[in-house]
Amino acid sequence: MSISAVKIVGSGLIGTSIGLALSARGVRVLMADIDPVASALAQSLIGKDHQASNSDTFDVVVLAVPPSSFKEVLDVEKELNPLSTFVDILSIKTKPLLEVQGMSDVASRFVGTHPMAGREISGAQSARGDLFVGRTWIVTTGESVQKRSSDLAAELISLCGALPVYMDAQEHDRAMALVSHAPQMLASVLSSQLIGVNPAWLTLIGQGFRDFTRIADSDPILWKEILSENSANILPVLSNFRKRLEEIESELSDSSFAQSAIELGNRGRKLIPGKHGNTARTYIYLHIVIDDKAGQLASIFNDCASANVNIEDVSIEHTPGQNTGLVTLSILDMDNARHLEGFLGEQGWKVHLTSN
Amino acid sequence: MSISAVKIVGSGLIGTSIGLALSARGVRVLMADIDPVASALAQSLIGKDHQASNSDTFDVVVLAVPPSSFKEVLDVEKELNPLSTFVDILSIKTKPLLEVQGMSDVASRFVGTHPMAGREISGAQSARGDLFVGRTWIVTTGESVQKRSSDLAAELISLCGALPVYMDAQEHDRAMALVSHAPQMLASVLSSQLIGVNPAWLTLIGQGFRDFTRIADSDPILWKEILSENSANILPVLSNFRKRLEEIESELSDSSFAQSAIELGNRGRKLIPGKHGNTARTYIYLHIVIDDKAGQLASIFNDCASANVNIEDVSIEHTPGQNTGLVTLSILDMDNARHLEGFLGEQGWKVHLTSN
C-alpha cells in the first residue's frame, strides 16, 4: 500500500465518510474544515488511533468542499503540501479541471473525481464508512496528470470499496445534467406549484407524487452552485424537455399519442441499471398483514430465518387507527418465495404472493 | 347495516380489493368481469361463504372497469339492477358524471367516487382487503342523486375502512391533473430521454432519478384513457410548467435565481401531508451494518423486540460482492431511538443514529 496518510479538507458527509473508510483500512487521516466543530466531530468519529498530524507528509489531500470554495482551498493546500496528490469530489467536473489547468504547480498532481454515493441528509454525523462500498466512483483525469497521482487516486477509491470508472470531464457533466441536475429542477418546479393551491387538493397527493418530488427537498445552497455552474449542460436538456412538452400539449387529447408517450417512458425506464449497477432485478413479493406492535417483525424474520430464505428488501406500510400494518418481503426467485409462503402460512401468517 | 349484497363489475386490483374488504365485514359479494378467469380468481379469493348470486337484489353495484368500458357496462347493469345504487371508482370524475346525467333512469342512483389507494401492480392476485384502510376516498355526487344512494356509497366506503371526502367532480379532475396526471407525463418524458444515450451515462443514475421516474413504469393502456379524457385539465398544468421552464432557462446561470427555484420547491414539498394524510412525520434513523445472509434480520428484530421499541419503517441496502448490507430502522421519537441504539450496541451491533 502506498497511501499511509491523507488530509481531508471538508468534514461533511462525503469527506467524513471517506475518512471513516480509509481509517478502517489502516490509513492515518487528518480531518479539516472551515468550521472547527465539524472537523472535531469528524476526527472523533474516526478515532484518535487513526489521527494524522499537521506535520505529516500527506500522500493525498482530498478536497471535499462546496464548488464555491474549491479554488480558494486548493490555493492554500498546494502551498502546504507541495508533494501531495490532490483529489476533489465535486459533482461537476469541467470547471475544477479548467481552474487547475491554469495552476502549473499543481496541474500534474490533481485528479478530478465524483463518487456516486450520497444521502438525503448531510453532515459528519450522517457519515458512514461503507457509503462507497460497491459504488461507482467517476474519475476524470486531465491530460497533464502524472501516473503516480492517478494511481494514488485509484488506490484511494479502492480503499473506500468503490469501483473507479474513467470518463471525460465534459461527458460527465453532460450526463449529470440529464440524470441529476435537470430532474432536480423539474421536481422543484412541480413542487413549487403546490404553493397556493386549494388545501383540499393536497389530500389527493399519493405515493407517486411523493416519490417524484422527493429530490425537491434538496439543499438550495449546494444546488445553486451545481445548477448555475453546470447551466451550459443543463439548458439543452431543459430546452429539449420543454419542446417535447409542447408537442405533447398539442396532441394529448389523442389517446394513441398519450399511449405512445407512456410507452416511450416505459422503454427509457427499462434502460436504468439495477440497484447496484447490475441489470435490474425482478422480485417476488410476499405481503403479510401484521399487528402494528413491537415483536411482530422479529417474529416474521425469525420464521424467515427458520425457512432459510434470504430477504432482499422489506417495506412496512402502516394503517394507523387500525393497529395493523402490511409487511412486504422481496425475494429473488420463485422457488424460495413459494417455499417461504408455505412455511409462513404454516406458522399462521396470512401471506399473499405477487410478482410483476 | 343496510348493505347486505354487492355486485362488483371488474375483477382487477381495485374491484377485488373492495370485494375482499366488504366480505370481511359480512357483505355477500358477486364478482364479475369480461374475463371469466379474472372473476373466478377474484371470487375464489373472497371465498364461497361470502358469495352472492345473480338472482340477488344488490344494494350497490360497483363499476370497477376502465374509463372506456364505463358507459357500456352501466347500460347493461342498470337494466339488470333497476333498484340498485351504482358507484364507480374511476380516477377521472367529470366525464362519467356527465354521461350518467343523460341517463334519466339511473342518474338519481349514481354516485361517482375515487379511492385514494392503488399499487404499482395490478390484477386480482394483487388485491388486498386492507387496501383502503385509513385512506381518503373521494365522493363526487351529482346534483340529482337521492339521499339513499349517497348514504349507501358512504356506508360502502366506511365498510372498506376508508374516509369519504366530498368534492366537486370538476375540482377533483383539476386537482388530479396537478398531483397525478401531469407528473405522470413529466416522468414519462424524462425517462424516454434515456433512449439512445451513451450507455456509460446510465452508470451515473442514482436513487434520485429512480424515484423521480418510478411512475414512468405505469400501464400505457390505462393511462392513455386517463390522459386523453382529462386532457382539458392537464393541458393548463403542463403549459404553466413549460412557461416556468422557459423563465428558468433564461436565468439558470444566475446562482441566486437557481437558489430561489430550489427554495420554492422546498416550500411546496412541505405542504404535502404525511404518509397517512396526517402531518408529515419526522423519524430518527438507526443505521446498522449487517452480514448479507439469512438470519441477521431476525436477530436484529429480536433485539428490537427485547428493547420494546416499535419500528416505524425498515429499509435494507445491499452491497453486493461485499456480503454486507445496511439496515436502516425508522423510529418516531428520540428517547426510544437512543434507548434502542444503546441496547443494540450492547448486543454487539454497530449502530449509527441520525436524524434530519
Image: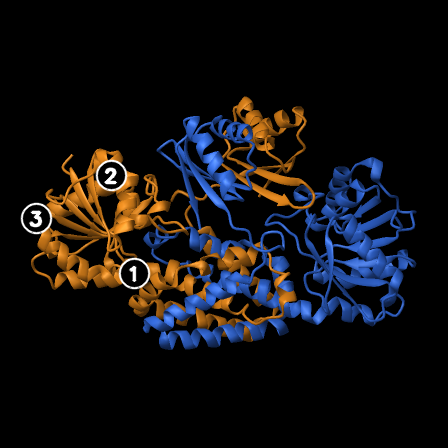
Chain colours: A orange, B blue
Vertically, is A284 above or below A139?
above
Which label's residue is closer to the chain start, 3 or 2?
2
Q: Which amino acid does label 2 sit on?
A: Leu
Residue in front for this viewpoint, B175 or A129: A129
Instruction: State the image quarter where residue A344 is shown.
Output: top right
- Residue neighbourhood size for the residue with mark 3, other residues' Cα within 10 Å, grouped as few (<14), some (14–19), many (≥20): some
Task: Identify the residue at image location x=57%, y=75%.
Answer: B236
Q: Which chain carries label 3?
A: A
Q: What element carries label 1?
A: helix
CA gap, disc 3 and disc 2: 20 Å
Badges 3 and 1, same chain: yes
Task: Identify the residue at image location x=50%, y=72%.
Answer: B241
Q: What residue type is labelled 1?
A: Asp
Residue B76 visible in the snapshot: no
Residue A190 visible in the snapshot: yes
Q: Position of residue B28 (x, y in %)?
A: 85, 43
Q: Mark 1 points at which residue?
A: A173
Q: Where is residue B303 in the image (x, y as percent from the top left)?
A: 51, 28
Q: Which mark is residue B332?
A: none
CA gap, disc 3 and disc 1: 29 Å
Q: Name the residue under label 2.
A: A22
Q: Position of residue B178 (x, y in %)?
A: 58, 67
Badges 2 and 1, same chain: yes
Q: Which amino acid does label 3 sit on?
A: Leu
Vertically, is B166 above or below A160?
below
Q: Which mark is residue A83?
A: 3
- Residue neighbourhood size for the residue with mark 2, other residues' Cα within 10 Å, grouped as few (<14), some (14–19), many (≥20): many
